């Protein structure tokens, strides 16, 4: 394939990520590099531009910005084609020129010898010179492509490249969390440095390729069925372990039979809670390999890598490594810090913000040899890896929004009135839908109309709580006005039907008394309560004319009127109030009663009966508004409860707890973890059929030696 064809194929990918000006910049860089390297060949006989194009392809997979892509196409024009920084500066601007000039200096550096001191010194020099971290991205991509074509080098040069890659560049890639590049570099270095070992491992893998592939497919299908049954959205990747990873384990004394993760699956779910639920499901079905569970979500690696790792014995006797993570974690695992530095520099404000972050990270890497893992992680989290984006108004004012924010979030950040009247949005001179996800440096213009109003669908995609609250407030106000007017009409109709006048029955004093009795604010609130059917107009008039009754009396009369029937019916409600099926019943969230608990009802103001456990502390001082209730024998629902588990400080015991829950037919819906006084405390939100199942689960947890206390909230 001709180099022009290769470039056009890559440029079509660029058009998916970059705007037209950026695409033009990349095309210009290609033509510049092509002219400078004209008639030059690489050692393997190919056109010289195949190398910049190969580097460009690697960088595209890392989601870097357009300036880095342009720099990759001309990164060797200073050292190998006679170009000058001034020439590049004039043609492409300071951003591209600085990257190319720095990479040109770095590419002249070499190890002075094979010592660790030399490697560490070169690492520091590389990082110190890379004031813009994108230079390191380019350096890593440059070396990876050179390794892919290293067969053409003489043995001595190849050995030097491999040694430098292993001792200098792979540790930097590891620090940056760029595992995809790191893994391929390791395999290629092993291929060139220990070809016999590399080929032997490859042959052993190839000999069982069909069997391993079949095993992976069967295991993938089994996990897919489990997650589908639990309604957990997911996708699965499967692979055979890399050659270098296997070599490294063998070199550390492991036998082939003791390598547990030759077969690997990666399960990607939507939520962190689903990561823990998934590993619990897998362990419930397949026997875990002792000591193989690692929780890198609760305790991320120093380069911010997060995932759950476990090893299990599959149905066919093979051992599997299973990694479970969210989409965001997976992107970071593939691209590392590069995933956080894909940005466009159209405005100096954003450029300055990002340069500050790059400088912070450069300093972190430079000093990281002296930092503990925890310190490094803390510094990166607090100083660098936030989830904010920066967008602009047409006047150039900058607004900070959370990642995933939309034009609606932007509009409400400007002013509530702007948000309420939004009818359209233009981002970077292009009309976009209102659920469009904004990116760094976007220029956002909001179109408003005096007749525009919020849409309830906005609540499904807005990101900021500020926007959500404003939208909800608008509809609450609108609905209140509608229900208030409806209540006023209903009350007036009832008065006309009874041939009563408003002034006679509902004087200001009477209205005030009724509002005090029902804990309402004013007459409009009274109308609203009638319009929402919280109270009937007839009941309000009865209060006005009889004076002594309250809502509790009315409800009790309704219940007692049916109390003479002792035959239980198959009601839809799980809880019966003297066999009355038309009373609104809800389970209290303060004490989470489950079937089998001793329960009592509490008559609420207009909200029916709230069902509590009899020992609920919230009812300690209540006597008048309590009412007898009982579980419906025909009910068949599941119930939520909160269980607190106090463990010894040490390893993460969550896996053992979730595994026990699964075996006891108890579903763990959510987990909160905190540490206090040398203890790890898990607060589990669990779902089960009844009290017996809950107590059975809690009793089984007490058998664990590492658990100090199990109690129900």
Image: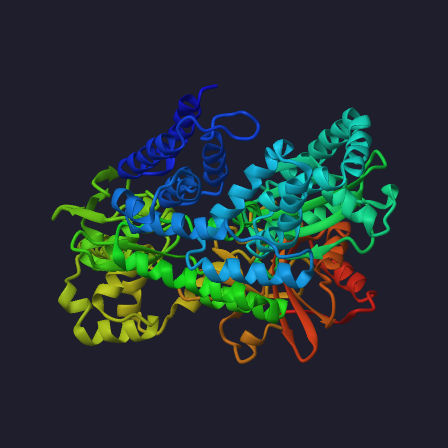
Q: From the viewer's perspective, is 540 left or right of 3? A: left
Q: Is residue 246 visible?
A: yes
Residue sitting nearer the eye, 562 or 691: 691
Q: Quadrant of residue 472?
A: bottom left
49 vs 273: above or below: above
Residue sitting nearer the eye, 299 or 515: 299
Q: From the viewer's perspective, is 348 left or right of 338? A: left
Q: Quadrant of the C terminus?
A: bottom right
Which residue occupies 44% across, 60% down?
Answer: 386
Residue sitting nearer the eye, 343 or 142: 142
Q: Quadrant of residue 640?
A: bottom right
Which residue occupies 51% across, 42% down?
Answer: 142
- Residue 641 percent location from the top left of the image: 63, 61
- Residue sticking out furthest to the left: 450
Which residue occupies 49% across, 33% down?
Answer: 51
**Total tally of numbered discs in the picture:** 0
Q: From the viewer's perspective, is 290 left or right of 432? A: right
- Residue 602 percent location from the top left of the image: 51, 67
- Residue 109 percent location from the top left of the image: 53, 53
438 vs 222: above or below: below
Residue sitting nearer the eye, 212 or 167: 167
Q: From the viewer's perspective, is 269 left or right of 711? A: left
């Amino acid at each position: 394939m001709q180099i022009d064809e290769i470039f056009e194929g890559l440029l079509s990918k660029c058009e998916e990520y970059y705007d037209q000006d950026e695409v033009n910049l990349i095309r210009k860089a290609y033509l510049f590099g092509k002219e400078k390297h004209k008639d030059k060949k690489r050692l393997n006989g190919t056109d010289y531009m195949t190398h910049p194009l190969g580097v460009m392809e690697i960088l595209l997979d890392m989601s870097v910005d357009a300036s880095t892509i342009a720099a990759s196409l001309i990164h060797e024009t200073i050292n190998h084609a006679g170009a000058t920084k001034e020439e590049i500066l004039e043609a492409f601007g300071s951003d591209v020129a600085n990257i190319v000039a720095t990479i040109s200096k770095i590419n002249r550096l070499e190890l002075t010898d094979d010592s660790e001191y030399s490697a560490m010194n070169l690492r520091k020099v590389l990082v110190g010179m890379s004031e813009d971290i994108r230079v390191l991205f380019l350096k890593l991509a440059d070396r990876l492509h050179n390794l892919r074509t290293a067969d053409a080098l003489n043995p001595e040069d190849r050995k030097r490249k491999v040694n430098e890659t292993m001792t200098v560049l792979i540790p930097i890639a590891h620090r940056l969390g760029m595992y995809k590049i790191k893994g391929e570099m390791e395999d290629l270095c092993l291929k060139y440095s220990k070809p016999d070992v590399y080929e032997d491992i490859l042959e052993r893998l190839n000999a069982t390729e069909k069997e391993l592939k079949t095993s992976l497919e069967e295991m993938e299908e089994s996990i897919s069925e489990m997650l589908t049954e639990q309604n957990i959205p997911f996708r699965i990747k499967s692979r055979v372990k890399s050659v270098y990873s296997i070599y490294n384990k063998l070199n550390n004394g492991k036998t082939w039979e003791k390598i547990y993760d030759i077969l690997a699956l990666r399960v990607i779910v939507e939520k962190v809670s689903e990561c823990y639920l998934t590993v619990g499901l897998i362990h419930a079905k397949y026997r875990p390999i002792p000591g193989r569970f690692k929780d890198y979500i609760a305790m991320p690696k120093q380069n911010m890598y997060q995932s759950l790792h476990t090893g299990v014995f599959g149905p066919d006797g093979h051992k599997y490594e299973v990694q479970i993570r969210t989409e965001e974690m997976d992107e970071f695992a593939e691209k590392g810090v590069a995933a956080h530095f894909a940005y466009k520099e159209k405005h100096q404000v954003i450029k300055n913000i990002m340069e500050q972050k790059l400088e912070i990270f450069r300093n972190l890497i430079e000093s990281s040899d002296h930092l503990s893992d925890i310190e490094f992680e803390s510094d990166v989290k607090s100083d660098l890896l936030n989830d904010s984006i920066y967008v602009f108004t047409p006047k150039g004012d900058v607004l900070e929004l959370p990642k995933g924010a939309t034009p609606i979030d932007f509009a409400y950040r400007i002013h509530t009135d702007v948000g309420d009247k939004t009818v359209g949005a233009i981002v970077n001179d292009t009309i976009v839908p209102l659920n469009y996800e904004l990116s760094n440096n976007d220029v956002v213009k909001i179109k408003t109309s005096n007749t525009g109003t919020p849409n309830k669908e906005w609540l499904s995609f807005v990101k900021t709580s500020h926007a959500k609250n404003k939208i909800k407030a608008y509809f609450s106000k609108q609905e209140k006005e509608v229900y208030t007017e409806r209540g006023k009409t209903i009350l007036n109709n009832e008065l006309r039907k009874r041939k009563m006048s408003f002034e006679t029955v509902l004087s200001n004093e009477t209205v005030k008394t009724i509002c005090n009795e029902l804990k309402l604010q004013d007459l409009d609130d009274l109308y609203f309560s009638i319009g929402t059917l919280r109270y009937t107009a007839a009941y309000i008039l009865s209060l006005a004319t009889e004076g002594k009754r309250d809502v509790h009396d009315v409800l009790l009369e309704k219940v007692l009127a049916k109390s003479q029937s002792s035959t239980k019916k198959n009601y839809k409600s799980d809880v019966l109030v003297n066999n009355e099926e038309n009373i609104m019943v809800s389970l209290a969230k303060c004490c989470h009663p489950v079937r089998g608990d001793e329960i009592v009802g509490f008559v609420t103001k207009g909200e029916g009966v709230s069902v509590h456990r009899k020992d609920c502390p919230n009812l300690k001082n209540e006597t008048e508004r309590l009412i007898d209730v009982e579980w419906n024998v025909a009910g068949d629902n599941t119930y939520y409860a909160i269980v607190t588990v106090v463990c010894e400080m040490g390893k993460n015991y969550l896996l053992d707890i979730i595994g026990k829950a699964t075996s006891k037919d108890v579903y763990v819906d959510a987990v909160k973890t905190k540490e206090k006084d040398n203890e790890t405390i898990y607060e589990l939100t669990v779902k089960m059929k009844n009290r017996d199942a809950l107590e059975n689960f809690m009793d089984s947890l007490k058998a664990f030696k590492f658990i100090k206390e199990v109690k129900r909230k």
